[in-house]
Amino acid sequence: MTAPLRRPGAGWLGAVVALGLIAALAFTGRVLHAPLEVADDAPRTTRGPRGFPRGWQRDGDLRWNVVSERSAHHALMVRVEMTEPERAHELAERLVDASRDDFEEILVYVYRPAAGSHLAERRVRWTRATGLDELVLLPVPRPALR
């Protein structure tokens, strides 16, 4: 009795297609269906320690999600996901205006949502002395696998 013939790589192809569908569902659920707005009287549980609303926010066509906020020694660090990281400076102006009286330095790190990267694409730094300064963080290329 002979074994049934199988095409080589068919199992891998199915796995890749399944992972692609899962990634597409995660992307649409996380980015495309983000809430359009949050009411000003939203419960405090939806706001972080500095009062920034959690979850996806929209102001005009600018969309963002404050992922975390940390402060120490008169400095604030805010991690943000944005659908358009190239507009990080515009968002940082809004976040800085809300907190500038309490801090000497504010750092806003901007990530692309659902990108799978743990590295920020941009960093906007504000200090009382220099104002806003944006730094584009280029991704580090990974060596090719042999």
Image: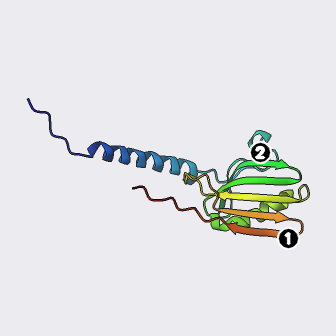
Residue 116 spot, x, y in % from top left: 55, 51
Residue at x 20% of width, y 45% of height: 7
Name the foreground residue: 51 vs 141.
Answer: 141
Quarter of the figure that contains the N terminus: top left
Q: Residue furthest top?
A: 1
Q: Which residue is drawn at 84% across and 57% down?
A: 98
Element carrying mark 1: loop
| Badge nearest the viewer, 1 or 2 | 1
Is 130 located above or below residue 76 in the figure? below
Q: Circle 1 is placed at which residue position?
A: 130
Quadrant the C terminus occupies: bottom left
Circle 2: residue type: Arg
In-image side of 126 versus 27 (left or right):
right
Q: Give the quadrant of residue 62.
A: bottom right
Is 77 positioned to the left or the right of 6 in the image?
right
Measured as percent of width and height from the top left, residue 39 is found at 75, 49
User: Is residue 67 left or right of 49 when viewed as pictured?
Assistant: left
Q: Which of 78 and 98 is in front in this view?
A: 78
Q: Distance between the residues labelled 1 and 2?
A: 29 Å
Where disc 2 sits, the SS reads: loop
Asked where in the image residue 85 lies, by quadrant, the reply is: bottom right
Find out whether the residues at labels 1 and 2 contact each other: C-beta distance under 8 Å. Answer: no
> Residue 18, image x and y in percent?
38, 44
Report crowding for label 1: few under 14, some 14 to 19, many 20 or more residues within 10 A (C-alpha).
few
Residue lying at 80% horizontally and 46% vertically, measured from the top left:
41
Q: Of the numbered discs in the image, which one, if any, rests on residue 100?
A: none
Q: Nearer the viewer, residue 146 or 108?
A: 146
Residue 47 disc label? 2
Residue 72 is situated, as x and y percent measured from the top left of the image, at 85, 48
Amino acid type of disc 1?
A: Thr
